[in-house]
Image (cartoon, grey):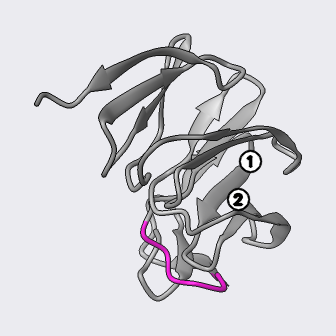
Amino acid sequence: LSTIGGEITAVRVGMPEIAWTFQCDGNVWASPVIFDGKVYIGDLSNKFYALDLQDGSLIWSVTLSAPNIGSAAILEDGLAVATEDGTVVALTTNGDKVWTRSIDGELYGSLVNYGEYLLVPATRGEVLLYALDANGNDRWSLVAPK
């Protein structure tokens, strides 16, 4: 669970008790993503974190160009995260940046991995939805009606 107070809380499945809590540097809007024994989450202080699923300890964090509002998407070789300033970043599960892509607009929504496409919803630009390939290149886009 994530809270606007910047707290990530893990609850034991089948038991009404808290397993662990992690305090982010900033407020959190997105839902955490769980993959390969790690919890991935970004906050409004421009940080993106990987936490150990078992005990909530910090594995790594990276500083992004702007706040992360939506949930990350799991990719074949890592994950992608979007920032409010229109940047999409692909990361390895070790936190290394693979590629960065600038999008015209602001990115508040969650990213979606759909087959060969990374779907990126945008706000305040001419394009409503970008479909990127595994390298961050445009595949197609949906333009807002006039």
In this rendering, the answer to whether 75 lies above or below 108 is above
Identified at 75% across, 34% down, the residue is 78
The residue labelled by disc 1 is 37
Decide whether the magenta segment is chiefly helix, strand or loop. Answer: loop
- Label 1 to label 2, Cα distance in Å? 5 Å
User: Is mark 1 in CB contact (under 8 Å) with mark 2?
Assistant: yes
- Across and down, in percent, residue 84 comes to 49, 61
Does the stretch in magenta take in 107? no
- Across and down, in percent, residue 43 comes to 57, 72
The residue furthest front is 146
| Amino acid type at mark 2 | Leu
For disc 2, the neighbor class at 10 Å (few under 14, some 14 to 19, many from 20) is some
Does the stretch in magenta take in 24? yes
Front-most of residues 26 and 2? 26
In this rendering, the answer to whether 124 lies above or below 7 is above
Q: Is residue 24 left or right of residue 37?
A: left
Front-most of residues 46 and 138? 138
In this rendering, the answer to whether 64 lies above or below 87 is below
The residue labelled by disc 2 is 53
Front-most of residues 58 and 65? 65
Q: Is residue 62 left or right of residue 5?
A: right
| Amino acid type at mark 1 | Gly
Q: Secondary structure at mark 1?
A: loop
- Across and down, in percent, residue 14 comes to 44, 60
- Across and down, in percent, residue 49 comes to 72, 64
Which range is magenta? 23-29
Q: Is residue 145 left or right of residue 96?
A: left
Q: Quadrant of the C terminus?
A: top left
For disc 1, the neighbor class at 10 Å (few under 14, some 14 to 19, many from 20) is few
Identified at 41% across, 82% down, the residue is 4
